[in-house]
Image (tube, rainbow, N blue to C red):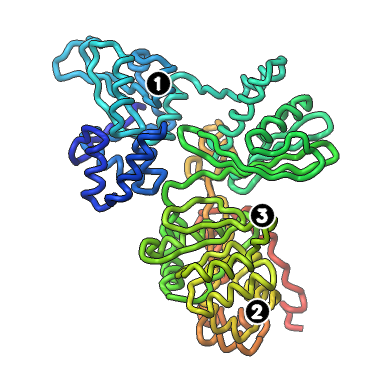
Amino acid sequence: MRAAIASTPGALLDDDARLLDVLAAEGLLGEDLRRIVEREHATGTTSLEDVLLEMGVSDPATLARLAGGARTVDLDDEAFVPDARAVACLDAAVARRFRVVPLAFERAAGQADDEDRATLVLASAGVADLPRRDAIVRALPPTLTVRWCVATGSGVARALARCHGAPLGLADIVADCDAGAGGDAIARLVDAVLSEAVTRGASDIHLSPEERFIRVRLRVDGVLVGLRVLQRRHLDALTVRIKVLAGADIAETRRPQDGRFTRHVHGRPVDFRFSSFPLRTGENLVLRVLERRRSPPSIDDLVPESGARVALRALMHRPDGLVVVCGPTGAGKSTTLYALLGERDTEALNVMTLEDPVEHPAVGVRQAGIDAARGLDYAAGVRALLRQDPDVLLIGEVRDAASCAMALRAAMTGHLVLTTVHASDAVSAIGRLRELGAEPGLLADVLTGVVAQRLLRLRCTHCDGRGDRDGVPCARCAGSTFGGRRAVLETLTLTPGLRRRLRAADDGESLTEVAIAEGHVPLRDRARRWVRDGVTTEAELDRVFGPPTPVPRDAVSGA
């Protein structure tokens, strides 16, 4: 299957200045920001398009639209097959260096099959980086003319791997390490593991030392899956390499350490958060994979049900109040918080966050991380933020009485406050806030709604959840029967009836009865609808929520 090339309407961009002119004309680039973009591009090593994307000026779809006659091409399709003769026209090292893919030859009607007189179609992640394009053209046979297409950075990286072989072959690098190759092999092994984690969409990488080997696993869609088993003798070298990347102390092996580093994977920067913990068998290493989003997710991206989207937007269109998102660790609470923030105008409002740590940089949002070593915890941080004239506050977590009191104070004084707590469902979150010292009357006044959520794996649509196609393991889900995850949410809006019960300090069972009587659907019941519709499975429901609690026999009989 060859990549589909489609024409894109609009003016052809001749140079970088033209692209900036078009962005300005569309209202995406003001005069001051343009000067900053030009300076960043002039003093950096990345293309103009990468600068625009990193600074949040535009998104890949908009840049592709503004590319005009350059046309766009989808290289993310796994079935894409390049024209071998076109690939041979450009040296592999040049193609990788400039991130460009020869696609095919185009000939005019009636033109002879002569490669020297044909037009070579090239795909690049950039749309107007003329110096880079000039260097590429100089590396081609001089008789060739060139036509450019626009592709995503990830698509170009995948296509290059198909054209020239992946530069990071994990199995081959492991074999080099086992054969006694030097430190360079260990560095390549670490990069290969990072690359594989990003390719599979993993959220975490685990390197766990056993008595005689090292187990390498990836957390994909919330479940740990094995990647490789490495020889135990590689442990020290792997640990040192990762600690060097993360800026940790390589000599310290008896205390936990944390760190962070950034690597370019598939042509885009990816952040990795590092944690080491000393075990009896050696240091256990975990890396959290934090891909930088070009634009934050929206409520439409996260929530398929229209009724749920309406309820969430209603919470965010209030000028003040407290909105709480709850769920266990890894349930996607932070992603939901940023989707909610996306409903507010960050240009007209002062939106500030206090997180532990800041995982996803967001343009237009003033973000800060807590620093307990310097006395900046959640309570002290919120107290300081209230002096920064905020309109909207995102507090990463309410975890003790002091931070709970400050969150309530911020909501009570006219701010819209978003935060999280660890609780199993929406009503339990209210109980958790009361345990942390929130007075029922005050909570009834300032709490506007609670969102509870879980992440459920979805049945693979490629193999219809069977795990194979004609006896061959499914290429999409690798036989797991699942493909991707989605958040199932319940949104509990504080109605007058619930406020009266909360103000009277009623227990959670009473609050649940009122909510259900008013039409509220509990979280597990919402998830069960997905099972009924074939979106997920009963086994996945039990994995995430636990098996259903059996009903006592005497309750059924009415005894």
Q: Alpha carbon of mark 2 to alpha carbon of mark 3: how far?
A: 32 Å
Amino acid type of the residue that numbered disc 1 sits on in the rendered structure: Ala
Judged left or right of residue 528, residue 244 is right
Q: Measured along the vertical axis of the image, is residue 416 above or below residue 195?
A: below
Report crowding for label 1: few under 14, some 14 to 19, many 20 or more residues within 10 A (C-alpha): many
User: Percent x, y for residue 411?
Assistant: 53, 76
What is the quadrant of residue 260 in the picture?
Answer: top right
Amino acid type of the residue that numbered disc 2 sits on in the rendered structure: Ala
Residue at mark 1: 95
Residue 28 marker: none
Q: Say which residue appears at 69% left-offset and 69% top-offset.
A: 400
- Nearer the observer, disc 1 or disc 3? 1
Which element carries disc 3, helix, strand or loop?
helix
Q: Say which residue appears at 46% left-offset and 72% top-offset.
A: 315
The answer to which of 554 and 42 lies nearer the viewer is 42
User: Percent x, y for residue 377?
Assistant: 65, 63
Q: Say which residue appears at 28% left-offset and 32% top-offset.
A: 5
Report crowding for label 2: few under 14, some 14 to 19, many 20 or more residues within 10 A (C-alpha): some
Q: Say which residue appears at 51% left-offset and 60% top-offset.
A: 336
Q: Earlier in the sequence, mark 2 or mark 1?
A: 1
Residue at mark 2: 438
Residue 543 marker: 3
The answer to which of 429 and 16 lies nearer the viewer is 16
